[in-house]
Amino acid sequence: MSSDDPASNVVLREARAADIPQMHRIRLAVRENRLTSNAITEANYLPAIGQWGRGWVVERDGMIVGFAVGNIETGNIWALFVDPDEEGRGHGQRLHDAMVSGLWANGFDRLWLTTQPGTRAQRFYEDAGWICTGEVERGEVRYELARR
């Protein structure tokens, strides 16, 4: 990539414990699927990326601008969020593809997630081939993705 390419300073990599403060900053900054309580704190991220899950981050110019976490025990997408100032640059798709590939590598035939209805996230997952399987608790909708 040339130095004029805006993607030339973009790096996708696995998440590390040192990334957690920036990941949580992004989680608190999103405009949709916002946290309404202190149910998720920085302490929740460590097992999510190091025990029962695996995480990925996108960095641009050394700053984390998005992250994704998948549960390697259940096939659940725990998180996929992009800094609102960085939306529309393909970071979400990069994270999605890395996370889905990582979960397929763990032997899953079907992945699942929940999200709030009527959001851009819902459209994002539908565009990526996820199928809505119905409403679940708290009014969220469940999506599943089958291995092709």
Image: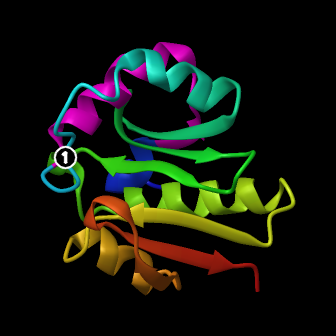
On screen, 1 above or below 49? Answer: below
Q: Identify the image quadrant of the C terminus.
A: bottom right
Left or right placement of residue 1 versus residue 91 in this view: right
Crowd band around label 1 with a 10 angstrom C-alpha radius: few (<14), some (14–19), many (20+): few
Residue plotted at (78% across, 63% down): 104
Magenta-colored stretch includes residue 14: yes
Which residue is tagged 1?
34
- Give x and y (percent) for residue 123: 31, 80
The answer to whether one can see residue 50 in this image is yes
Residue plotted at (42% across, 84% down): 126
Count numbered badges in the picture. Answer: 1
Left or right placement of residue 105 versus residue 54 in this view: right
Q: Give the range drawn in magenta.
A: 11-30
Left or right placement of residue 97 versus residue 50 in this view: left
On screen, 36 above or below 81? Answer: above
Left or right placement of residue 55 versus residue 62 in this view: right
The answer to whether one can see residue 4 in this image is no
- Give x and y (percent) for residue 32: 17, 56
